[in-house]
């Protein structure tokens, strides 16, 4: 099974900051990497698919990059509504799909 | 706008079978993969498995011996059964649609709101 490891597990930042979250796969997954945002009590929401493609309706301050085993999610200028937990997910191999453990982004 | 809604008992006794149904509205269930994903309180997401509208399935090996999925295209529904449950199966269970366009585009684009299932006597 492919293991996904995110860092950091938690992060404190201020509105307007630039934030980067990293996701590492235990083996190469090419560009089969997606990012989701989850707010408390809500289902995850797709932000980025195929490592760097922005889902329709998602603000352009979100961006993704990487391929192979190392990926990043960047928020260029944090907004109040961005404070949430972020998950990466690989769709390279089935079964099973796997998610990172999550990165909780909190207000400093 | 596609919408997914999970339904089923919120409380299941240990050793019994958890049964959930996901109803899809606003679009056809046909020609997609449909997944179940769960999340214990305060923890991360675990993919349980998926079913295609033909009935073909893939399950997480960690749960495979206890999982059964089915689909009813006439009702635009798909279902999950998880047998021999324990307290470790207590979680919010989500259903989700998977888009698989190839060329690295394979992701969950629509999710249900989630339903909490507690395993307790």
Image (spheres, grey):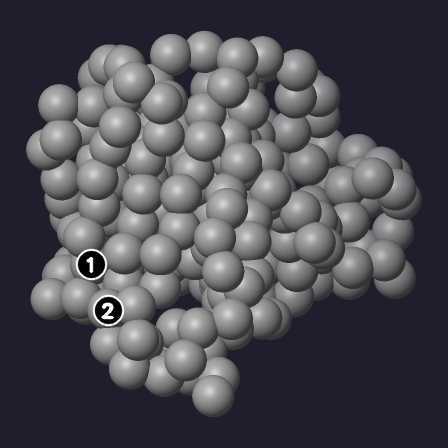
B63 and A59: which one is in front?
B63
| Numbered tag placed on residue B83 in the rendering | 2
The chain containing the residue under callout 2 comes to B
Q: Is residue B95 left or right of residue A81?
A: left
Q: Looking at the picture, does residue B90 appear above or below residue B50?
A: below
Marks 2 and 1 sit apart, C-alpha to C-alpha, by 7 Å
- Badge 1 is on which residue? B67
Q: Residues within 10 Å of mark 2 (few under 14, many from 20)?
A: some
* Element on which disc 2 rests: loop
Residue drawn where x is 88% and y is 42% of the image: A80
Question: Residue A23 location in percent, x, y?
Answer: 43, 51
Q: Residue furthest bottom?
A: B121
Q: Looking at the picture, does residue B19 appear above or below residue A88?
A: below
The chain containing the residue under callout 1 comes to B
Q: Are marks 2 and 1 in contact (CB under 8 Å)?
A: yes
Q: Quadrant of residue A56?
A: top right
* Element on which disc 1 rests: strand
Residue drawn where x is 54% and y is 64% of the image: B10
Q: Quadrant of residue B56?
A: top left
Q: Looking at the picture, does residue B111 appear above or below residue A8?
A: above
Q: Are marks 2 and 1 on the same chain?
A: yes
Question: Residue B18 location in percent, x, y?
Answer: 35, 64
């Amino acid at each position: 099974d492919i293991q996904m490891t995110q860092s950091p597990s938690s992060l404190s930042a201020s509105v307007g900051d630039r934030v980067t979250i990293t996701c590492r796969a235990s083996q190469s997954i090419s560009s089969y990497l997606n990012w989701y945002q989850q707010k408390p009590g809500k289902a995850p929401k797709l932000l980025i698919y195929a490592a760097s493609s922005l889902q329709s309706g998602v603000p352009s301050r979100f961006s993704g990059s990487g391929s192979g085993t190392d990926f990043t999610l960047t928020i260029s200028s944090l907004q109040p509504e961005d404070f949430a937990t972020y998950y990466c997910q690989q769709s390279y191999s089935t079964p099973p799909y796997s998610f990172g453990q999550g990165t909780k982004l909190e207000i400093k | 706008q596609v919408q997914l809604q999970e339904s089923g008992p919120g409380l299941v006794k240990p050793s019994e079978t958890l049964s959930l149904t996901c109803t899809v509205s606003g679009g056809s269930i046909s020609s997609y993969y449909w997944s179940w994903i769960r999340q214990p309180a305060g923890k991360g997401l675990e993919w349980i498995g998926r079913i295609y509208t033909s009935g073909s399935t893939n399950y997480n090996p960690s749960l495979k011996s206890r999982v059964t999925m089915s689909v009813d295209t006439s009702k635009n529904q798909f279902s999950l059964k998880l047998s021999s449950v324990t307290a470790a199966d207590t979680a919010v269970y989500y259903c989700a649609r998977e888009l698989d366009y190839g060329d690295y585009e394979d992701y969950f684009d629509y999710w249900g709101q989630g339903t909490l299932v507690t395993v307790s006597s």
